[in-house]
Amino acid sequence: MYERFNRKPFTSRIKDTSFLLQNTFKVVGTNKDIIKPTMRMAVLSIILTTLLFISLLSFFTGRSVGWGVLLLLGLIFVLTPMKFFYYIRQKANQSWLTYNTITGSSIGYRDAHRHTKKQKSSLRQLTFIEIIAKYVGSQRGSKSGVGSILTNLFLSAFVEIWDLLSHYMLPAVVVEQKPLRQLVPQIKSLRNNVPATLVGVFGIDFVGNIINMIVFPLYLVTLLIGVGIGYLLSSVMPDTVWTLGSLSFSWVPPFIALYIVFIIGGIVGKFIESTKVIYFTIFYAAISHPQEISVEMRDELTHYLQMADVDSPA
């Protein structure tokens, strides 16, 4: 699907993305608790972003720089690693809520949180692997030369394998309730057991890509507006004026604009992650436990996975 999606016209890609985002929460809309993990992740994202900008503010103003340094170090070495564990747990809660909803069981957020507590060991392992994968992904192409070609190939292969596993490992962990090492062979064999009607739907990263393509110009405009306001306020706030070439402006409005951009970007990112969690939980259930899916929801979920309207011809 990802390759086919990239070959589509831009307007068609927007339409497909809109369909997926709208129907993700529509399909599981019978259980309002499914949105709670998304909201909790968004709140943490807002808190971490706010703390980051508070620490940066101390450097810009020259006040309480020592506290700013301590806060920045705490963010880097304590809160950032912790957020990975928190996000994985929340996504696991969301996956279990989704699975129970489509199989006809009505559970709440607290029920899901109690359930995923039993898989804390496997979820911690998933978190460590995700941290490593993100680091490995950041190292691809960072070095040049003949000797680094094999290294880059290895890193690329690792990232691609993890990209596949990460989408399906989370629902497998919460549904199967088995140790991670027992689930890896099962996940790897999924490709060989995908129904013909669903072949090619591995990977919906285009959702994040297309959203970023749409919102990036908005971010840029917001930042430029901030610079423009800073230019107008440069005479009013002379102590905050920066000069870049021949342009002088107050850094306060661009700083606020950048904060707003980071806040919005973090929230959008969490909704994209939740879309993937919900989609691939449904996908995993359709492949591994199709008989468990509620009869009333089977047709609707099948069309959802195929990204087709219910009333459209097969």
Image (cartoon, helix red, strand yellow):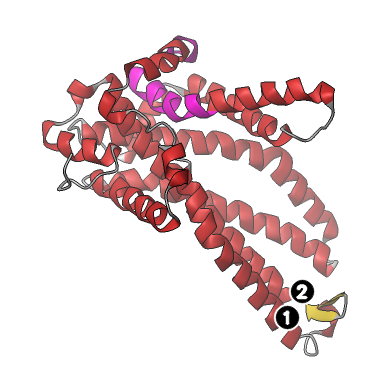
Q: Count residues near mark 2 (Cα–Cα under 10 Å), then give few for <14, some for 14-19, many for 20+.
A: many
Please give the count of numbered marks on the rendered protein: 2
Q: Residue at 19% of width from left, 32% of height from top?
A: 105
Q: Identify the magenta region.
A: 163-183
Q: Residue at 33% of width from left, 26% of height from top?
A: 284
> Residue 97: within the magenta?
no
Against 302, is 241 above or below?
below
Which residue occupies the extreme bottom position in the image?
235
| Residue 120 at x, y percent in the picture | 48, 24
Using the numbered discs, state the Cα–Cα distance from disc 1 to disc 2 in whole angstroms: 6 Å
Where is mark 1, residue-wise? 230
| Residue 156 at x, y percent in the picture | 64, 27
| Residue 271 at x, y percent in the picture | 44, 50
Residue 203 falls in image quadrant: top left
Q: Which mark is residue 58?
A: none
Q: Residue at 39% of width from left, 35% of height from top?
A: 93
Look at the image and tell me whether residue 40 can be seen. Answer: no
> Residue 177: within the magenta?
yes
The reply to whether the C-beta atoms of the residues labelled 1 and 2 are less than 8 Å apart is yes
Main SS of residues in magenta? helix
- What residue type is disc 1 on? Gly
Where is mark 2, residue-wise? 251
Q: Nearer the viewer, residue 196 or 225?
A: 196
Which residue occupies the extreme left position in the image?
296
Q: Residue at 59% of width from left, 63% of height from top?
A: 261
Q: Nearer the viewer, residue 302 or 249?
A: 302
- What residue type is disc 2 on? Trp
Name the image quarter holding the N terminus.
Answer: top left
Look at the image and tell me whether residue 170 can be seen. Answer: yes
| Residue 96 at x, y percent in the picture | 33, 31
Q: Is residue 267 left or right of residue 138?
A: left
